[in-house]
Amino acid sequence: MAKSRFEYVKEFEKENYLLQNCYIIIRIDGKNFHKFSKEYQFEKPNDSRALNLMNKASLSLFSKFNDVIMAYGDSDEYSFLLRKNTVLYERRESKLNSIFVSFFTAYYNHYWNEFFPDNPLDVNRLPTFDSRCILYPSAENVKDYFKWRQVDCHINNLYNTTFWTLIEKGKLSPKEAENKLIGTLSSDKNEILFSQFGINYNNEKEIYKKGTIITRDYNYNKSNKEIENENENENKNKNTGKIFEVNLTERQKQRENKKIKRAKILIEHIDLIKDDFWKEKSIF
Ligand code: GTP
Ligand code: MG
């Protein structure tokens, strides 16, 4: 078909193909949730309904894309790790960002009533999210990324728990609570909670302290023999550099997909800072 004389404008569109051989992390974050959480009266400092809704939306996304191998979230954010050699949407940054964030937002809105049945969404105050893609060249960097997010979750949660306890139980004003916490270390906050309010921070819910991790257990429901055979095959592929590469044969791709479909999805609130976590999970 002949091109119209307007066709040249297409040349202005530029794609950013994310660098090969790097892990892609897509992080989604609630837009202005400080305000949004007030408008919908989220419980302070943690609202389990809101966290469970974030988890449900993320789980839907995780189940939808086989190339997502791990997800981690707390508060109003969620990070999705794509396998190193994914060719999802040809690694086009704008496609990945826009598709992930729109699916996530759609799921979040869709499931809202299940978690907040008495608080319907107002069309003028709908929940929205932003998203970014980050590239990491090594497994070490990826591990540090998730450790960074989990440490952040811990620091924020300890601060928020102490802050709101000082206000709600200690009857301080927000300004007084803020002043009291200036320059305090983690140990000071633990001490305030324990000595003044009898709260042992260690007993707080794991989901609040550690956030939520979504992974797949590929060995679920398999005999030891099956696991052994698969490990042998994978090692062979690793040695030939073929694992997860774009040029996997159709049969290898089918096998990969079958493995993912059979896997059990795990949702956990555990420590990922210690090496044990990474040794146990077959993520890298
Ligand atoms: P942008 O992300 O820059 O748009 O701003 P933001 O207001 O979303 O801030 P940010 O993402 O840094 O922080 C998330 C905010 O969401 C927190 O500071 C809280 O105010 C709020 N939030 C998230 N989860 C909860 C919750 O369970 N309960 C309450 N009360 N607030 C929450
Ligand atoms: Mg936010």
Image (tube, helix red, strand yellow):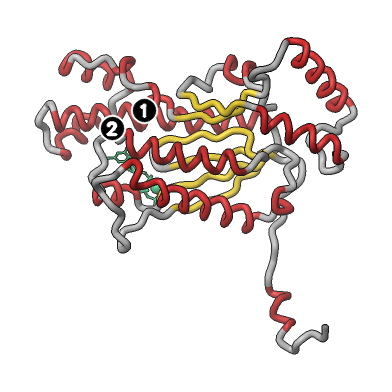
Badge 2 amino acid: Asn
Element assignment for label 2: helix
Q: Is mark 2 within 8 Å of ligand 1?
A: yes
Would you place residue 67 above or below residue 194 in this image? Answer: below
Q: Tag on residue 160?
A: 2
Quadrant assignment, res 22: top right
Residue wearing tag 1: 208
Q: Nearer the viewer, residue 92 or 261?
A: 261
The quarter of the image holding the C terminus is top right
Quadrant for ligand 1 reads top left
Residue 268: where, in percent of width, then height?
A: 49, 24
The residue positioned 73% from the left and 10% from the top of the image is 224
- Up-down relation of residue 98 to residue 268 (above or below): below
Report the amino acid beneath label 1.
Tyr
**Side of 93 where 8 appears, left or right:** right
Query: In the figure, residue 169 lies in which quadrant?
Result: top left
Q: Is residue 149 left or right of residue 173?
A: right
Contact check, label 2 and label 1, Cβ < 8 Å: no
Q: Residue 151: x, y in percent?
A: 45, 28
Which x, y percent locates residue 204? 31, 20
